[in-house]
């Protein structure tokens, strides 16, 4: 691949011409409206990715070390109690 490899923590400079295991990126959409919330850089999922976390109170959607974007304010993953439909 001819795309530079970004560090998930962004504290290291990108590497040029790296060996990629599983290059990929994430797009986060609000499935109710179809609006794109965020899009990540290209990362190597072999070394940086992991289990998806939908907030758990943090307000941030993550996959391992990769921050995908902000969670929707009414996302169930960020609420400790059940929300009544409106």
Image (cartoon, helix red, strand yellow):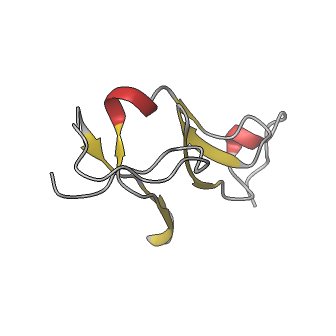
Residue at the location (49% across, 53% down)? 13
Question: What residue is rendered at 68% in x and 49% in y?
Answer: 75
User: How many numbered discs?
Assistant: 0
The answer to whether 71 appears left or right of 1 in the picture is right
Residue in front for this viewpoint, 11 or 86: 11
Looking at the picture, does residue 55 appear above or below residue 46? below
Q: Residue 29: x percent and y percent? A: 47, 62
Residue 5 appears left or right of 83: left
Tell me which corner region of the image, top left, top right, bottom left or bottom right, holds residue 21: top left
Whether residue 84 sits left or right of residue 20 in the image: it is right
Q: Image point 40% across, 52% down: which residue? A: 26
Horizontal relation, residue 19 to residue 6: left or right? left
Task: Name the quarter where the C terminus is drawn.
Answer: bottom right
Q: Front-most of 43 and 25?
A: 43
Q: Which residue sits furthest left?
A: 1
Residue in the picture at 73% in, 55% down:
74
Q: Position of residue 51 (x, y in %)?
A: 49, 26
Residue 40: x and y in percent read 45, 58
Horizontal and vertical percent position of residue 55: 69, 40
């Amino acid at each position: 691949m001819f795309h530079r490899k970004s560090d998930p923590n962004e504290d290291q400079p990108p590497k040029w011409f790296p060996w990629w295991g599983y290059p990929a990126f994430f797009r986060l959409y609000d499935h109710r409206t179809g609006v794109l919330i965020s899009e990540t850089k290209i990362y190597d999922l072999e070394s940086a990715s992991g289990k998806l976390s939908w907030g758990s109170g943090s307000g941030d959607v993550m996959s391992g070390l990769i921050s995908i974007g902000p969670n929707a304010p009414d996302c169930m993953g960020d609420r400790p109690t059940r929300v009544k439909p409106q």
